[in-house]
Amino acid sequence: MPRARQAGPLLLAVSVWLLARVEAARGLVPALGLFTGPLGLALLGLGLAAGVARFRRGAAGWALKPSLAVLFVVAFLLAAGLGLHHVSRLAPTGDEIRYLIVAQSLWRDGDIDLRDNFDRGDYREYVPELRRPLGIRGRKGPLLPLHRPGLPALVAPAYALAGRIGCAVLLAALLSALGLVVRRLALRATRDEAAAFVAWASVVGSPALSFAAFLYPEVPAALCVALALSLIAPDATAGRAAAAALAVSFLPWLHPRLALGAVALGAVALVRLRGRSRIAFTVCAAAMAAGFVLFNKSVYGAWVPMRAYKGTLGRAPVEQALTGLLLDPSFGLLVYAPVFVLALAGLVSVVLGRKREGFVPALLLAALVAPVARFGHWYGGFSAPARLVTAAVPLLAVLAALRYAEHGPSRRGLARWAVPLLAAGLALTLFLFAAPERKLHVQGRDSEPRAWSALAGDVSLARYLPRMARPADPEAPTPDAPAAEKRVAIVWGVALLGLLALDRLAARSDRVDRAFRGVTLPAGLFLLLSLAVDGWARQGEMPTSAPPTVEDVEGGEDAE
């Protein structure tokens, strides 16, 4: 590989960084203002890393094949380090408080009546004061948790042993196990070690890594999905089938919105399993489902316990929710985990019939996302980004692995971008958690996207992303997005469709594939997208950047 070509990413990064400091250049391309602050340094670092990687590939082939033990330890140290750093410096926020007090009640009282816990002030172990008791009144008088007790029951022993620190360690262990299960799923689907490694890295990075610090049900839910899919196979024993049924049945106990995903997994099991294994799965799943329904009827007074979510379901425009789930600057999956653009490319392969192994993950992905697309609080409340799609991360990782392995070792098209996309997502997550007291990693619907303000120079990246989450309004929990945000969403939709089309063309065109190897394509996409936003979508709006403040995120008692 010619040395000039190896140095291409670094030369481009330096050129953009220098142009960003030229006022005339910013006048022609306002988006260059993004790189006058910390984001410019990040661009230089990415360019240097890409150049070094190209040099290594040019000098000698090298492959990374760590053992399962190494993968588990690396993921655990990363997640535990991040989680302990977070819980030692920041009090719980939002629904974390709800889950913690239920865990206390289960461990100390053996029930989920929260009255005595509030009377004793158990919450003072992690927050100094509450404005009101967090719960709903049951039909017989007790103060009941808003959310199902699956997560509190899971973390109660860890909390009893070591408080929030114990919970963070437990979640780190679950995330590490999730990475290994997903790697196995990807290896089974692709027979490609490198693709399996990409799947592992995408799972232990953003957004799941954030929820090793936040006490939410996302990591346990993702692990249940991955375990069930791993255990459901035609040659599964009756014991493995029963274990799969337990994993599937635990999903609604973590949150009712996961029930449709559990039903879809159950349908896959009934199709795939045979003989005694199918019977074992059916009996176990039916018993668990009956227990869940009877529990809700006896405790909450309803077979389908959605009274607690009244006013938040069925209010989000589907197109607004789906756009926000992918691209919102505070909550979007691709914004904080860009590697999952490979999963979109994998979905294209499934639709075109080229990857039948991806049909089941695609089906399950739709089942997990569908309730969120009509959920009034689709953004996930007061939490880390991409909360409501984190349970689907194992499925996205398998789809990404399928696309990565599609052309074998040549890694054509978007597969060439896998490593820098993974690195960008991980670096952003570590930046968000570096100083927890700044709360850059905590997103609230009523606040500015603080992460991008902190990284901004003269302009914040949030300007170039569609803001789908609207300020709170009791009359319209998720009102329609302004016209400018819709236009930005259209620009991004066209850009993503164009990128996916080029990715397909790269499969049979060496010329198009070479564009993915160079710097011209990403630079051109950035230029076209930014000019379209500035010149059309946000025409007349001044590109400015406002610094984040802690006051923007104080409070945090939003419901899911």
Image (cartoon, rainbow, N blue to C red):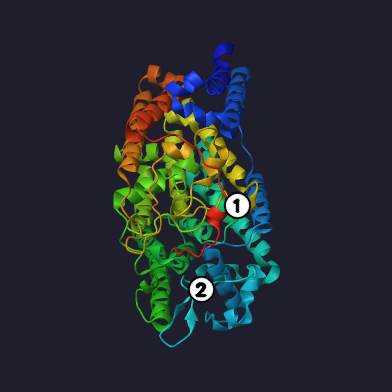
Q: Which mark is residue 176?
A: 1
Q: Which mark is residue 270?
A: none
Q: Is residue 392 above or below residue 287?
A: above
- Quarter location, residue 422: top right
Q: Secondary structure at mark 2?
A: loop
Can see residue 411?
no
Residue at the spot x=54%, y=72% of the render? Answer: 131
Q: Which residue is mark 2?
A: 134
Front residue of this view, candidates 200 and 488 = 488
Q: Position of residue 168 (x, y in %)?
A: 63, 59
Q: Secondary structure at mark 1?
A: helix
| x and y percentages locating residue 92 in the rendered image | 59, 62
Decide: few, some or many residues near mark 1? Use Cα within 10 Å; few <14, some 14-19, many ≥20.
Answer: many
Amino acid found under the numbered disc labelled 2: Leu
Q: Position of residue 309 (x, y in %)?
A: 38, 68
Across and down, in percent, residue 411 comes to: 47, 28
How many numbered circles are shown?
A: 2
Left or right: residue 231 versus residue 11 is left
Mark 1 is on which residue type? Ser
Work out how far the residue at label 1 is from the one at label 2, CA to CA, in angstroms.
32 Å
In the shown orientation, is residue 275 left or right of residue 7? Answer: left
Q: Is residue 375 above or below residue 186?
A: below
Residue nearest the viewer, comparing 480 with 511: 480
Q: Earlier in the sequence, mark 1 or mark 2?
A: 2
